[in-house]
Amino acid sequence: MPLCMTREKIGSPEALNSLAGRLKERAGGRKMVSVCLGTGCRAEGSGEVYEAIREAVGELGLEDEVIVMGSGCHGLCALGPLVILTPDDIFYPKVSPEDATEIIEKSVIGSQPVDRLLYKTGGKTCRCQSEVPFYGRQERIVLGLNGIVDPHMIEDYIREGGYQSLAEVLYKYPPEDVVSEISASGLRGRGGGGFPTGRKWESCRAVETEDGKFVICNADEGDPGAFMDRSIMEANPHTVIEGMVIGAYAVGAEEGYIYIRKEYPLALNTLQCALEQARDYGLLGHDILGSGRDFEINVARGGGAFVCGESTALTASIEGRVGEPGAKHIHTTESGLWGRPTVLNNVETWANVPEIIKRGSRWFASIGSEGSKGTKVFSLVGAIKNTGLIEVPMGITLREIIEDIGGGMAGNHGFKAVQTGGPSGGCIPADHLDMKVDFDSLIEVGSMMGSGGMIVMDESSCMVDVARYFLDFLRTESCGKCTPCRDGTEQMFMILDRICRGKAGEDELGKLEEIAELVRETSLCKLGSSAPNPVLSTLRFFRDEYEAHIRDKKCPAGVCSALIEFSIDQEKCVCCGRCANECPVDCIAGTAGKPPAKASEEDHQEGKVGEPFLIDVQECVKCGSCFDVCPTDAVEKK
């Protein structure tokens, strides 16, 4: 529900402060119901929850007293749809449309929580978000306004102090002082490389040119299992825009681009709305905040090529050329987009800038570890209870993330490995759970920070198959420009595939390592040079699994179908027939050799389903359906 319907250009910091004050005053005294409309919660039906709550507010005649807001990602995607009530500070997970009226009547009007809807864990009931263990260990800087602002309402961002850092910079900071402040903060690029942001800005600022400069936001997040940048843009696009305008002022640019993947329609819609509203208020475009400074942001849509996350491939794509990397004998800060000096940072890096200006470089540098300052946003996915979006201080341990924030492993299997850094990252075993999560520590164990994907795997995962999966992705995404990456990733995949099928010879591990090292040392761009990481890290920490596949022709995890076989323990079989019912190829029959009759649920319950069953291993397609449905674990996988 908008608090400001007309938008006139803001001509000074004083006018910005005045608007923020009026917006705070209008919001004061009103209660707010924030419904997560991020992609994860939308998939669970949060759109219907939002509409139901709005309808309940309307039916009770509370439109002037209650703000119903659709916000970006709240983080705990595993328990969506999520709803937060303020100022009573009540947190509800897994809300359904049927809960709407009760929430409004009891929690909004009565300020009392609905006990059955509260988050419960270990016998403890959590009323507010901060009491939930998932949020307790986080330090939310970039994600701090998620759940508080409507991403389609710039007024919410201004009300919470948005664009104040920009006003401070334009009227009080010389450009070189902005660069110095970012340098002193220790901010490093969050896109994967971890290059010092201040040093990059200084390199670009120092270049003298009459042709103009550019700043670019890399929103081409393409890692499987990663959704950090997308969620930031969906939840609070103005923090990215404000960061870019500050960066443009610091380096002397008047034009910028946000390069966003075509697969992100919700983020694109939110971003375009935010850009339009920022222009309406004079916070973007000509004569920003009456300062005489100009800066415009264009949106460029990527075609979905993973390699276009690399800087030179990205700039080539914006220029309309084939998105493939080029040699970096000249830095982008000297000759980037259309040959002009260019600063390129990713979404999360830009989003940190306003807070650094607002709270100071010392504050930011006080968070994190020695060489990695501030916080990092991760997407936490895989075989873990609390999947979602998290923001933690650099230097936190993997164990704290997985056990305290993630809630430990889901299901009956123990922890086996966590992959960080996307498909080009490494797989880290249980022995290293107490290592710090920062740029340098991850590189030491053969992984990397990457953009922030974190995939947790349990003991049911085959690490050879995991390496094959990521190499399959990387070989497909290789642009093919350089031979080491184009042919090397293909050769590594072929060897991994032979190993998984039990067709590899004992000399092939040596070949695999030799090719991996060659690709790492000689590839043109980071896609190729980091592609061997999943291979080399799994060889380093899980070599015994590779050897079992090659020497014993067995997959210890029971994943590689060519190396497993299903059978039925006759003593455990209770003749229920479920396995036969589920078999897609009818290869399960009774011991007498008769085709199994399709059994009804009544037959199961009364035990009227014939004699014990056998699997015809010659016909079995190893789908595992029988294994999954057997109630007595009579079906064995070997």
Image (cartoon, rainbow, N blue to C red):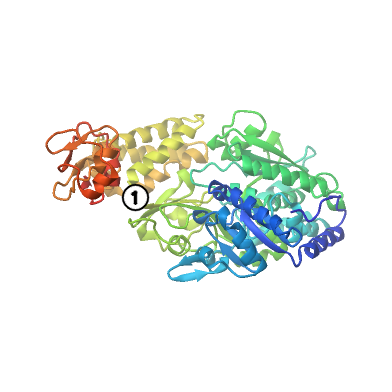
Q: Nearer the viewer, residue 575 or 633?
A: 575
Q: Position of residue 206 (x, y in %)?
A: 73, 48
Q: Please tell me how many numbered marks the rendered image carries.
A: 1
Q: Is residue 416 left or right of residue 87?
A: left
Residue at horizontal 70 percent and vertical 38 percent from the top: 299
Residue in front for this viewpoint, 561 or 318: 561
Is residue 200 or residue 221 the one in the foreground? 221
Residue 84 seen: no
Q: Is residue 404 left or right of residue 414?
A: right
Is 77 rendered above or below residue 370?
A: above
Q: Is residue 585 above or below residue 95?
A: above
The picture places residue 312, in percent across and down from the top left corner, at: 60, 37
Residue reaching furthest to the left:
592
Q: Quadrant of residue 599?
A: top left
Q: Residue at x 60, y 36 (%)?
A: 262
Residue 476 pos. (x, y %): 46, 32
Q: Residues within 10 Å of mark 1 (few under 14, many from 20)?
A: some
* Secondary structure category for the residue under label 1: helix
Which quadrant holds the C terminus? top left
Mark 1: which amino acid? Arg
**Residue 235: percent from the left, percent from the top?**
64, 52
Q: Is residue 141 left or right of residue 550?
A: right
Tell me the quadrant of the picture where the N terminus can be found: bottom right
- 553 to 122, vertically: above or below: above
Mark 1 sits on what residue?
A: 540
Residue nearest the observer in this picture, 543 or 97: 97
Residue 300 visible: yes
